[in-house]
Amino acid sequence: MEKMSGPHEKHGPIRGSRGEHYKFMLLLLLCPPTLDIAKPQSLLSLQKPANMAPKTVLITGCSDDGIGYGLAVTFQKQGYHVFATSRNLGKMTKLNGLSNVTLLQLDVTEPSQIEAAVTAVQAQTGGTLDVLINNAGRNHFMPYLDEDVEQVKALYDINVWGPLRVTKAFVPLLIKAQGSIAFITSISGYLNVPFMGTYAGSKRALELMADTLRLELVPFHVKVLCIPTGAVRTQGQTYFEDFKLPEDSLYKPIEETIAARAQGQDGTERMPLMDYSSQVAAQIEQGATGRFWCGANSDRTKASISGDSNDMMDDIFVKITQLDTL
């Protein structure tokens, strides 16, 4: 067996596999500090420079006490720089003045305002965006037979084409950051609830669009998440304080019932806004994709669509909307 030099033999030869190991260890000890030695990714991720810029998120539809507002507050508390947007800056009074929150006017149907928002984000981030949350939208209640088709087109322009416009505009920044896009959808898109068909159709269309984008953006390392949302305690129902049916509506005898449902006075259990916001933000932060069901009744809706028959749900909706009284 070949004799190895002892550690006291400073000038003796170092041979064999153990010798090579000692030589490597000496090189590590003697190498200059500037030598680039690869580290495990887990260690690199923990060693962030103290001056690293915060992650960024842009959220549409951030009027006070709505879902966008709740998400903005949640991400701000988590250290993100939040770009909070609304059609009317005056409706974001509770976010005004918060640190690391930039308020931007953004109507998702106006290309010039979308372009201005992109420019503002680029100027502040150097051309990246970590998270885009498409939340802006409009609720809507009306029997299909009483719909004004032009108003239906306007609703789809806000709820479907608006998020598409915003996503197309910001996707170069998201690709650069390998970020995430979230779409706030609705469980109503899975339920044929009377008088909500137009709204539900717009939200289901948005979800199908998002599902397709999820696949189309895989090659560019951008994650896409849909959040089918159940009942959440927000101010969204203030849209319908003056709800009225046309005088010749077939549903005039149950107008009060329809109006009460439109205004959120239907006795539905609602998840507290900040509980919803924290759960959704956690999923986005983890890089989740696909669907995350959240809000009151979302679990029940998810379970109900797994069956082969809608007869039970149909019976329930007919009764609670008083269609059986006509």
Image: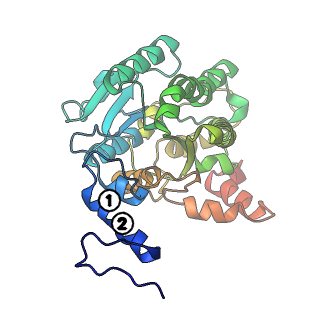
- Residue type at mark 1: give it: Leu
Task: Report the side of 325 relative to 288 (left or right).
Answer: right
Q: Is residue 136 visible?
A: no
- How many other residues sit within 10 Å of disc 1, few (<14), some (14-19) or many (≥20)? few
Disc 1/disc 2 C-alpha distance (Å): 6 Å
**Circles 1 and 2: CB atoms closer than 8 Å:** yes
Residue 84 occupies which quadrant of the picture?
top left
Mark 2: amino acid:
Lys
**Residue at 24%, 30% in the rendered image:** 93
Element under disc 1: helix
Q: Is residue 19 above or below residue 291?
A: below
Indicate how the structure is coloured in the image: rainbow
Across and down, in percent, residue 263 comes to 47, 42
Q: Residue furthest top?
A: 112
Residue 166 in the image: state x and y as whole percent.
52, 25
13 lies left or right of 315: left
Residue at 36% x, 24% y: name it.
126
Outermost bottom residue: 1
Q: Which residue is mark 1?
A: 27
> Which secondary structure, mark 2?
helix
Q: Is residue 240 above or below residue 189?
A: above
Question: Where does residue 143 sit, x and y in percent of width and height?
Answer: 67, 36
Residue 17 location (% of width, % of height): 47, 75
Q: Give the farthest residue toward the right.
A: 308
Residue placed under numbered mark 2 in the picture: 23
Q: Nearer the viewer, residue 257 or 296?
A: 296
